[in-house]
Image: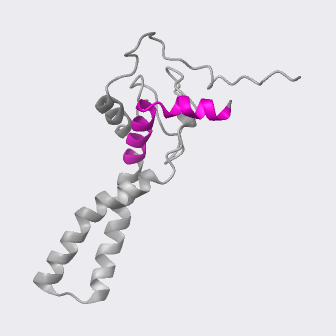
């Protein structure tokens, strides 16, 4: 029988022992928004544009175990859409520009705003998932 391989990510436990070891919900989401580790607030969440680091460089929190998947793009499109679409309708009603002008202005604007918002929103989702204990659930699913 082969011994089970150990991973440093599976062995991570919060440095403080007790029931309230995790920071408050809003704090963890805010840290994620700022590209900081949701647990310690010092390490980075991302390596590159959207690649989550395997573990926090300061506290060792297993951030790479959290798979945000489709939630960040969904929240990004929802947020940016609610900002851009009313402006499109107001401009259409007031000025009635030709369709090519709408496409030349609104599509690049929507794309740029989505690209700007996607990274902080993904960081917030990582903080949210970490606070909900989904890193522990990933460990249980692997083991």
Please provide the residue range marked out in magenta.
120-142
Q: Quadrant of the C terminus?
A: top right
Q: Position of residue 99 (x, y in %)?
A: 29, 88
Q: How many marks?
A: 0
Is 113 drawn above or below residue 102 in the view shown?
A: above
Drawn side of residue 32 relative to residue 86, left or right: right
Q: Is 32 or 47 nearer to us in this picture?
A: 32
Is 112 drawn above or below residue 91 in the view shown?
A: above
Drawn side of residue 15 relative to residue 142, left or right: left
Q: Which residue is drawn at 44% across and 11% down?
A: 16
Q: Where is residue 50 in the image (x, y as percent from the top left)?
A: 50, 47
Residue farthest toward the bottom in the current orientation of the protein: 98
Magenta run includes residue 123: yes
Q: In which quarter of the image is the N terminus?
A: top right
Drawn side of residue 55 relative to residue 108, left or right: right
Residue 128 figure quarter: top left
Q: Residue at x 14, y 76 (%)?
A: 90
Magenta run includes residue 110: no
Q: Where is residue 62 in the image (x, y as percent from the top left)?
A: 55, 29
Q: Which residue is drawn at 35% across and 71% down?
A: 108
Is 127 drawn above or below residue 2 in the view shown?
A: below
Q: Is residue 27 among the parts visible in the rendering?
A: yes
Residue 78 figure quarter: bottom left
Q: Position of residue 56 (x, y in %)?
A: 52, 27
Q: Is 16 or 54 nearer to us in this picture?
A: 16
């Amino acid at each position: 029988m082969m011994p089970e391989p150990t991973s440093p990510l599976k062995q991570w436990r919060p440095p403080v022992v007790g029931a309230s070891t995790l920071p408050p919900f809003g704090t963890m989401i805010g840290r994620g928004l700022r590209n900081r580790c949701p647990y310690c607030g010092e390490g980075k969440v991302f390596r590159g544009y959207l690649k989550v680091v395997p573990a926090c460089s300061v506290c060792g929190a297993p951030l790479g175990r959290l798979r945000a998947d489709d939630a960040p793009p969904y929240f990004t499109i929802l947020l940016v859409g609610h900002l851009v679409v009313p402006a499109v309708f107001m401009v259409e009603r007031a000025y009635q520009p030709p369709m090519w002008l709408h496409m030349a202005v609104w599509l690049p604007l929507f794309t740029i705003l989505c690209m700007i918002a996607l990274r902080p929103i993904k960081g917030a989702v990582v903080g949210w998932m970490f606070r909900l204990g989904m890193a522990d659930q990933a460990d249980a699913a692997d083991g």
